[in-house]
Image (tube, rainbow, N blue to C red):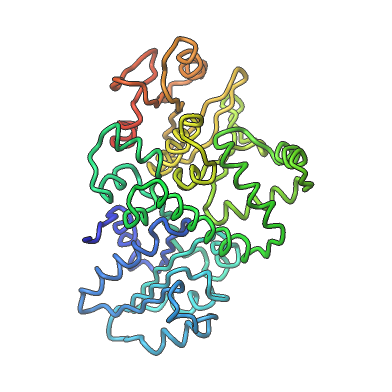
Amino acid sequence: MNAILRQDYLEKIERYLGKDTIIILTGQRRVGKSYILRLFRDKVSKDERANVIFVDKEKHEFDDIKTYKDLNAYIDARRNKAKTNYILVDEIQDIDEFEKSVRSYYEEPDIEIVVTGSNSRMLSSDLSTLIGGRYKEIYIQALSYEEFMLFHQLTDSDETLAKYIQFGGLPGLVKMGLDEQDAREYQLDVYNTVLLKDVIMRNKIRNVPFLENLVRFLADNTGKIVSANSITKYMKSQGESVTSMAIINYIKFLCDAFLIHKVNRYDIHGKKLFESNDKFYFEDNGLRNALAGGSREGDIEKVIENIVYNHLVRLGYEVSVGQLQAGEIDFVCNKPEGQRVYVQASYIIADEATREREFGNLCAIKDNYPKYVISMTPLVGKQDSDGITHLHLRSFLTEGLG
């Protein structure tokens, strides 16, 4: 199969070349960071003025590179000062004190650095201090719906959307095919790798059964308001006694590994963020489905909300959960330049009660920012009602909010 370009990410990388900036591709394992890094490697390798130094810490031939000193020695042995040296390191967090190596090279005039990492702790205050904030993080997500169609050679249809809802956007599925059993085995393999390498080993977790139960609880409660106290009570009902602080720490570890994303509540009237009772969404809805088990019929609302959240992030929004005195708005979405939109996600607007719930809360917001309901209601086109735009999920995933 020919290489499929994820052009937006390649353009983001190229935008920061030549600016004394370390480019860091972050995101969950197996969402395509390595693939994008290799695409970039292949592109720059065609330039006669380029010297590519490539390290893939997931390949056994690089097992000897364990510390920053090993990495320095590897780079120095291959550096060509007569050319632009592209230092490309995949899963750099697996190299002890890698930040010292990055710091020693990134300001050199003949060097560009692009690395990947599957744990947000690599962007810790220590790294920021050592390199003076001179890095650009590019967050790599699982495949969008449009990328999913491209990778699997499908056309836009309700059937294709159903496959995306069911299987999600892990790029590796293109090799497995969209067979239920094969896909689930692959997704669970990815999950176990992320959990072992980026959560359990990195944080020296001993209570692994509790961690696994916690992930499955979050999968079953995707899109619901939960707190550490509510999880503690649930775990006690299952015969597991854990503290709220332990739960908070475990959730942070899962977020650090990009397996899940925590979304804070935002008081629309009070214009402030709450510090507790959050929602959680999975990086990949297919992986979430594999963990939750069962069919999608019983939890389709959760899956749609997960998909809408991820696509809003893909569109460049900072997303919070909206809180009104009379109810909840699924998403308050802001951009740095001051843009804001409100979004409700639903399955099907089939009766007046559902319509009142989804549209009524938006009507209660007394400002002039755009408001949207996104659903899978059959035959719905782009409709406007009382200043609220109703979009079909397929339209949103292919055309955005425009």
Residue 317 x/y as whole percent: 43, 40
Q: Nearer the viewer, residue 272 or 274?
A: 274
Vertical placement of residue 253 versus 395, above or below: below
- Location of the C terminus (image quadrant): top left
* Residue pictured at 28% horizontal, 35% vertical: 399
> Where is residue 30 shown, x and y percent of the image?
43, 58
Left or right of 125, for residue 75: left
The residue lying furthest to the bottom in this view is: 77
- Residue drawn at point x = 57 percent, y = 51 percent: 255
Above/below status of 58 relative to 6: below
Q: Quadrant of the N terminus?
A: bottom left
**Left or right of 3, for residue 29:** right
Of 283 and 266, nearer the camera is 283
Res 116 quadrant in image: bottom left
Residue 366 makes an appearance in the image: no
Question: In the picture shown, does residue 215 fall above or below 17?
Answer: above
Residue 393: x and y in percent read 35, 30
**Residue at left 59%, top 36%?**
221
Q: Which residue is most to the front? A: 181
Q: Name the spot of residue 140 as percent of width and height, x first.
A: 41, 54
Residue 350 visible in the displayed image:
yes
